[in-house]
Image (tube, rainbow, N blue to C red):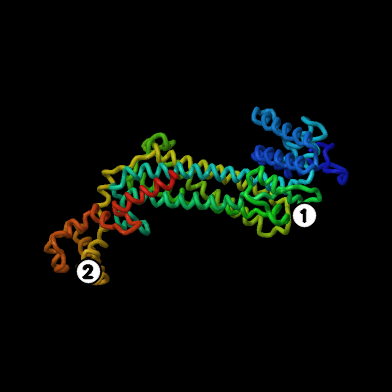
Amino acid sequence: MTKEQTWSQRFESALHPAIARFNASIGFDIELIEYDLTGSQAHAKMLAHTGIISSEEGEQLVTGLEQIRQEYHQGKFQPGVDAEDVHFAVEKRLTEIVGDVGKKLHTARSRNDQVGTDTRLYLRDQIQQIKSELREFQGVLLDIAEKHVETLIPGYTHLQRAQPVSLAHHLLAYFQMAQRDWERLGDVSRRVNISPLGCGALAGTTFPIDRHYTAKLLDFDDIYANSLDGVSDRDFAIEFLCAASLIMVHLSRLAEEVILWSSEEFRFVTLKDSCATGSSIMPQKKNPDVPELVRGKTGRVFGHLQAMLVIMKGLPLAYNKDLQEDKECLFDSVKTVKASLEAMTILLREGLEFRTQRLAEAVTEDFSNATDVADYLAARGVPFREAYNLVGKVVKTSIAAGKLLKDLKLSEWQQLHPAFAADIYEAISPRQVVAARNSYGGTGFVQVSKALIAARAQIDR
């Protein structure tokens, strides 16, 4: 800050330049300018509505604030560190435009409730944008799944081949994760959408303000019932970061699978050139940079969540300067989640192709149909645990002989147990193994088709 700038007559000198830079938040909270202008316009209208200022003064303030908005859009309003933060920058410019009446804007308001209002308006808007991106992501998952109901893919537990499943069923698992993310954001949004405006610095104000009036103008659902809580609450920010972290968990899990699937060891998908890069030294390489970056950026959002929890854990009531640190956590997390959702959506839509022939081969080259042999015997009256042990024995001998279950002769099956008949081969074919799992929520083709219809209706309504 310049030598002439002091906080008030309480101070005899300005901040040291290095402390001014350290203290300033204008470098990042300019992100809030649209919301600061909108909140300030609502506050000006309320001051006029309650008679705290005249109607003419209220109109001057609203018009001046709108001029600042246009100047910002045109690149003409670019405050520097001297402004300290976006709120002072706006008030200073407003006074230049409308004169001394601009100095009345801050009547009955503190930066504490002002920044709380701006942050909530910002986050409310960003949550809606992220929810829209989640819907697009879900839509792409459905588009792919609808083409691959009867495409089979090995299912894994412990990263070991377990049972074959429908590829559509596998993708629908990620659809359901995204649906919970979408619903979770809606739940968070309800607690974001509560207005602290009018709480003042911490104790309210002596002016006859109407907090419900500004809340209505700004489309808030409710107002904080306690002024101390209103200016110091950041639960909503932590809740958002929790929801954001879970979105990144889900994207990262899918990213990890794409990375595995695209490897030479799996060869389940081919990465297209539009979403892959090469090596600087190995010309044959095609690297899965998009999912690797998503996997890496996940830790970044986790870090912001941890930072916010640490910021809040020891703060006495009410506002403390530590809370300035919430913005970079929120802003970066919002940008990271949005960018990651967009990148993964593009990757799925146009960046990879499932190798159906390779997938068809993959489900025939293991013992993932062993459970179906046990189920076959159990359906014929053999106690399941006895059947389980019998199948374990035949798997062991088959491995020793270099055979798969499909390679055993009927006589070998019947030596194992007389209940086996010629239909065992159909029962353990990969397609039948999948089709037979027709319990609700299972991978059977009938169930998957129903699940796709329900999922499509869910995102279309």
Q: Nearer the viewer, residue 122 or 414?
A: 122
In this view, the residue in front, 33 or 37, is 37
What is the crowding at mark 1: few (fewer than 14 residues within 10 Å), some, or many (at least 20)?
some
Q: Position of residue 386 (x, y in %)?
A: 24, 72
How far across and how far down the image is residue 324, in percent?
69, 48
Q: Is 421 left or right of 64, judged from the image as shown? A: left
Residue 417's place in the image compared with 186, above or below, is: below
- Residue named by callout 1: 203
Disc 2: CA contacts within 10 A as few (<14), some (14-19) or many (>=20):
some
Q: Is residue 273 or residue 95 the one in the foreground?
A: 95
Quadrant of residue 147 within the rendered picture: top left
Give the Cα separation between the discs numbered 2 and 1: 75 Å
Task: Please give the residue where the numbered disc 2 appears in the rendered image.
Answer: 390
- Residue at figure coordinates x 27%, y 54% from the top left: 434
Quarter of the rendering occupied by the N terminus: top right
Give the x, y percent position of residue 339: 51, 41
70 displayed left or right of 165: right
Q: Of the residues shown, which amino acid type is indicated by label 2? A: Leu
Q: Quadrant of the C terminus?
A: top left
Mark identifier at residue 13: none
Q: From the viewer's perspective, tell me whether residue 417 is left or right of residue 439.
A: left
Disc tally is: 2
Mark 2 or 1 closer to N-term? 1
Secondary structure at badge 1 equals: loop
Q: Position of residue 176 (x, y in %)?
A: 42, 52
Three-letter code for the amino acid on which mark 1 is drawn: Ala
